[in-house]
Image (cartoon, rainbow, N blue to C red):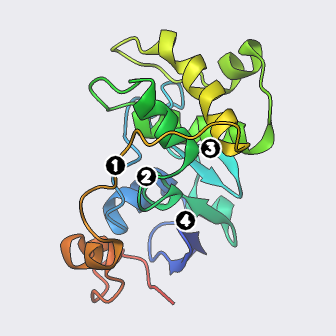
């Protein structure tokens, strides 16, 4: 029964150790930001951070990340204030939105480790597939996020989600942390 940390909370999944992280997050933790796109690691819709690195969660077995720290789009920033989220909104990157959480997570990992990525480095880090074709705005959003993170620019493009973070647990069962564990659900410690 693998144990690791998801969005700052210790979890213990009572699931088959071969379960892909994507399904543990979506089915057992009700964290549905990471999307199932292809199941083969090609599309990037399921990207989360594992120990700060972008990882395609459909390919990661929960047994392989014992003791790791996982961050999902829900844990990146509760109020959408992360520089990448702000830059994506300011540059109007999202269209249908399906691929956007994975793109944001891939971009956030890049921005965290590279204070001045080149176009080639951006293209290499963000290989996500997008049916809407948001690629022309993607590079500028990453560049803008870098400037915001460095304090060289301020933007207020993405308003808070309209709910106080303290009240979010009342609206979103997965944030309560007090639910009785369902079969296969993680045990919060």
| Dot placed on the residue nearer the N-terminal end, 3 or 1 | 3
Q: Quadrant of residue 50?
A: bottom right
> How far, Cα to Cα, is label 3 from label 1?
27 Å
Q: Foreground mark, 1 or 2?
A: 1
| Residue at disc 4, secondary structure | loop
| Dot placed on the residue nearer the N-terminal end, 4 or 1 | 4
Residue 40, image x and y in percent?
50, 30
Q: Is mark 2 in CB contact (under 8 Å) with mark 3? A: no
Residue designated by label 2: 80
Residue designated by label 1: 159
Residue 30, image x and y in percent?
31, 64
> How far, Cα to Cα, is label 4 from label 2?
32 Å
| Dot placed on the residue nearer the N-terminal end, 4 or 3 | 4
- In the picture, measured across the screen, residue 135 lies left or right of residue 2, that is left
Viewport quadrant of the N terminus: bottom right
Q: Foreground mark, 2 or 3?
A: 2
- In the picture, measured across the screen, residue 13 lies left or right of residue 167, that is right
Q: Is mark 4 in CB contact (under 8 Å) with mark 3? A: no
Q: Quadrant of residue 152?
A: top right
Residue designated by label 3: 55
> How far, Cα to Cα, is label 1 from label 2?
7 Å
Q: Foreground mark, 4 or 2?
A: 2
The relative height of residue 137 versus residue 15 in the rendered view (above or below) is: above
Residue depicted at 76% across the width and 21% down the height:
121
Q: Which mark is residue 17?
A: 4
> How far, Cα to Cα, is label 4 from label 1?
39 Å
Q: Foreground mark, 4 or 1?
A: 1
| Residue at disc 2, secondary structure | loop
């Amino acid at each position: 029964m693998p144990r690791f940390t998801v969005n700052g909370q210790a979890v213990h999944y009572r699931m088959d150790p071969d379960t892909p992280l994507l399904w543990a997050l979506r089915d057992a933790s009700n964290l549905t930001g990471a999307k199932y796109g292809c199941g083969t690691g090609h599309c990037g819709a399921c990207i989360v951070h594992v120990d700060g690195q972008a990882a395609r969660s459909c390919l990661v077995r929960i047994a392989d990340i014992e003791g790791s720290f996982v961050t999902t789009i829900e844990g990146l920033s509760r109020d959408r204030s992360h520089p990448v989220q702000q830059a994506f909104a300011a540059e109007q990157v999202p269209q249908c939105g399906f691929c956007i959480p994975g793109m944001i997570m891939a971009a956030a990992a890049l921005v965290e480790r590279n204070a001045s990525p080149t176009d080639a480095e951006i293209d290499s880090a963000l290989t996500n597939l997008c049916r809407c074709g948001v690629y022309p705005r993607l590079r500028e959003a990453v560049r803008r996020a870098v400037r915001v993170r460095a304090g060289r620019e301020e933007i207020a493009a993405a308003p808070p989600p309209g709910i106080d973070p303290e009240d979010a647990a009342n609206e979103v069962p997965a944030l309560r942390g007090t639910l009785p564990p369902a079969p296969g659900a993680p045990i919060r410690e």
